[in-house]
């Protein structure tokens, strides 16, 4: 391939945005192509019909896998802390082991990683390419969310194609990863600082978290448990839909979270196929 | 009891036949109870020497008298020195010798003679509807409001007065509410517990006498000196928690060894109280030390926070408690089942589409 058409940080030129393509090969305006055009991803042509587009930049992929490891560890240790499923089989003194202590230590360590990771991801919302953020405050976003729901319920033959996440997926990230993380981080830090409500950090959370989440320690704790399991429900759906997308589109969705690249038909970046 | 006393607390004590030595012992014990530094016991003694006995009116609303029972079992300071020396208990349904109109008269006199000086101790919650609580032919809510307005401070003794407690537990037939719902400007100190620890009850009064002001309160209005720590963080079984050694049932080996009661429903991790430090009955023991899990009686809504001997999570905004892991696992499994069905549908549809030769 001689024409490595790399457009670093440049918008794939979509000349007919806003009107239906007359040839039927180019995409019309949708919530993705019309979004943040100055932050489009770079791509290179690899075949006559397809391009290799750099969808998930390295910071996003690092965030994803750090998040995966953190959530996985937090969940295992969290379930143990909530309901210790393993215990010493023979009677012994407390002196010899520190099992719950370690579970809690690992849980707290991962909690800080998880939190730092989330903050770092917020930075990338503003710094990364257009697939690193979303804007649900647009009518077209909600119209296409509805189209996507219909598609997932088999009402529709094809959903509008998205190189990044479809609007429904974006909503699920905002709800679970965004709102869910906020709830679990703040309730978590409240619980973490319960032994030191007088400390500076304790005061940061004791002044408002209990009022927002029902007043007493027990209710705050309940929120933490329930949101943790909501994360698990999310994970199942997330992994399934990623595999499904890969199966239906055959565009390298599954490998893209490791490599960052997806294979997309040229028309989706606004180019014609080579003859 | 009705006469307006002008004696200082020390004078009152000495008149009772207490020696000066015993008086100083009482002050030191009180300082320790309040969590003060040893050097501050001088301050306590000085306050007792110069200040008059504080008039106290003790109202009982929707209660069980358990708080009164706890109060009279205080050991340091002793109940008699509190009742006879430190405070002047002007009105109480349990301990008062006077009855009927005489007793009601005593309360009126306090309002007349000690406006802005007396302490109003309240036990029990208040119902929204007058029909549920009438004392001496008067709606208890009106009596409370009248006495609350003229009080220097209100002590909400017990979980009922502080949070609503058992009368307010679902389905709350009387529409019971904590007394704070009916107070306008008078400062309220919450002393929750079912009942509160006796020394905590007297310690709060001791603080007001000694320093002439209310103790420092936390974000929920409880005195920090007694409610700043979780029971879990001061528990004598904490080492077993950290070691991961738990009682599984009340007749197992761990129970005999004194393991942590976390798995048999101990509410210590969500309960703020000083049971683990002050202990009960003169510092002899407290529930966890005696082998029973904490039931979290000093927390808001403890009666609705699920079974005493099981660990649960509450669905926020309801009285429903669930086992979060079982429900969470079920929800995840249900999702997985849904995914399996959806995946099957996806594959079938794709095969049909491919057969029809549909692309794009």
Image: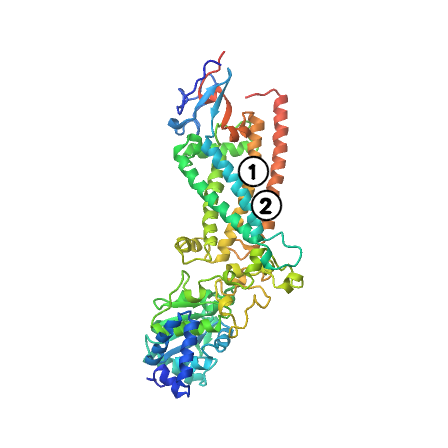
> In the rendering, at what x and y percent does residue B246 appear?
61, 58
Q: Which of B140 and B8 is in front in this view?
A: B8
Residue placed at 47% from the left, 13% from the top?
A2
Identify which residue is drawn at 44% across, 85% down. Answer: B98
Q: Can residue B122 be seen in this view?
A: no
Q: Which colour scheme is used?
A: rainbow
Secondary structure state at the residue bearing disc 1: helix
Tell me the residue at 57%/39% (across/down). A236
Identify the residue position indicated by label 2 in the image: B331
* Element class at badge 2: helix
- Using the rendered image, report if marks 2 and 1 lie on a common chain: no
Q: Can residue B198 be seen in this view?
A: yes
Q: Are marks 2 and 1 in contact (CB under 8 Å)?
A: no
Q: Which mark is residue B149?
A: none
Q: Name the residue under label 1.
A: A237
- Left-right relation of A49 to A10: right
Q: Which chain carries label 1?
A: A
State the residue lying farthest toward the top. Answer: A275
How far apart are the two marked residues, 2 and 1, measured between alpha carbons?
Answer: 12 Å
């Amino acid at each position: 391939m001689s024409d490595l058409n790399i457009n670093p940080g440049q918008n794939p030129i979509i000349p007919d945005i806003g009107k239906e393509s007359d040839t039927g090969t180019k995409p019309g305006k949708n919530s993705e192509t019309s979004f943040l055009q100055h932050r489009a991803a770079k791509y290179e042509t690899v075949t006559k019909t397809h391009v290799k587009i750099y969808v998930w930049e390295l910071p996003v992929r690092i965030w994803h896998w750090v998040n995966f490891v953190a959530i996985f560890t937090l969940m295992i240790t969290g379930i143990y802390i909530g309901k210790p499923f393993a215990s010493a089989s023979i009677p012994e003194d407390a002196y010899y082991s520190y099992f719950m202590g370690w579970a809690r230590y690992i849980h707290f360590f991962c909690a800080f990683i998880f939190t730092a990771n989330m903050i770092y991801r917020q930075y990338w919302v503003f710094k990364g390419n257009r697939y690193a953020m979303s804007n649900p405050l647009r009518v077209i976003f909600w119209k296409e969310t509805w189209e996507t729901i219909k598609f997932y319920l088999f009402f529709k033959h094809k959903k509008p194609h998205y190189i990044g996440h479809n609007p429904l997926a974006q909503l699920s990230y905002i709800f679970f990863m965004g709102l869910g993380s906020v709830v679990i981080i703040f309730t978590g830090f409240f619980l973490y600082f319960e032994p030191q409500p007088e400390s500076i950090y304790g005061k940061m959370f004791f002044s408002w978290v209990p009022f927002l989440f029902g007043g007493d320690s027990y209710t705050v704790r309940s929120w933490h448990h329930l949101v943790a399991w909501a994360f698990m429900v999310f994970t199942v759906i997330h992994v399934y839909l990623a595999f499904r997308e890969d199966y239906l589109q055959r565009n390298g969705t599954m490998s893209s979270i490791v490599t960052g690249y997806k294979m997309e038909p040229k028309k989706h970046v606004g180019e014609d196929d080579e003859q | 009891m009705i006469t307006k006393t002008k004696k200082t607390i020390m004078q009152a004590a000495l008149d009772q036949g207490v020696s000066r030595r015993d008086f100083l012992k009482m002050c030191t014990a009180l300082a320790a109870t309040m969590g003060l530094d040893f050097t501050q016991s001088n301050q306590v003694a000085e306050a007792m020497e110069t200040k008059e006995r504080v008039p106290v009116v003790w109202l009982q609303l929707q209660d069980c008298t358990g708080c009164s029972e706890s109060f009279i079992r205080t050991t340091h300071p002793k109940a008699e020195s509190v009742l006879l020396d430190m405070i002047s208990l002007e009105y109480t349904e349990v301990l008062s010798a006077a009855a009927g109109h005489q007793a009601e008269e005593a309360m009126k006199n306090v309002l007349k003679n000690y406006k802005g000086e007396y302490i109003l101790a309240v036990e029990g919650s208040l119902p929204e509807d007058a029909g549920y609580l009438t004392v001496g032919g008067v709606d208890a809510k009106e009596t409370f409001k009248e006495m609350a307005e003229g009080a220097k401070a209100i002590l909400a003794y017990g979980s009922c007065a502080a949070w609503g407690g058992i009368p307010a537990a679902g389905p709350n037939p009387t529409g019971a509410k904590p007394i704070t719902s009916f107070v306008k400007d008078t400062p309220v100190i919450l002393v929750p517990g079912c009942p509160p620890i006796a020394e905590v009850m007297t310690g709060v009064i001791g603080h007001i006498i000694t320093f002439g002001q209310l103790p420092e309160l936390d974000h929920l209005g409880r005195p920090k000196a007694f409610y700043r720590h979780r029971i879990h963080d001061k528990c004598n079984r904490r080492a077993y928690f950290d070691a991961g050694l738990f009682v599984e049932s009340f007749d197992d080996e761990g129970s005999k060894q004194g393991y942590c009661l976390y798995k048999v429903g101990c509410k210590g991790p969500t309960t703020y109280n000083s049971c683990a430090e002050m202990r009960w009955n003169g510092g002899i023991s407290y529930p966890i030390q005696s082998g029973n899990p904490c039931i979290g009686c000093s927390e808001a809504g403890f009666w609705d926070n699920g079974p005493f001997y099981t660990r649960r999570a509450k669905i926020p905004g309801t009285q429903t408690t669930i086992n979060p892991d079982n429900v969470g696992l079920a929800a995840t499994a249900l999702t997985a089942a849904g995914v399996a069905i959806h995946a099957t549908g996806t594959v079938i549809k794709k095969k049909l589409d491919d057969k029809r030769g549909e692309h794009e």
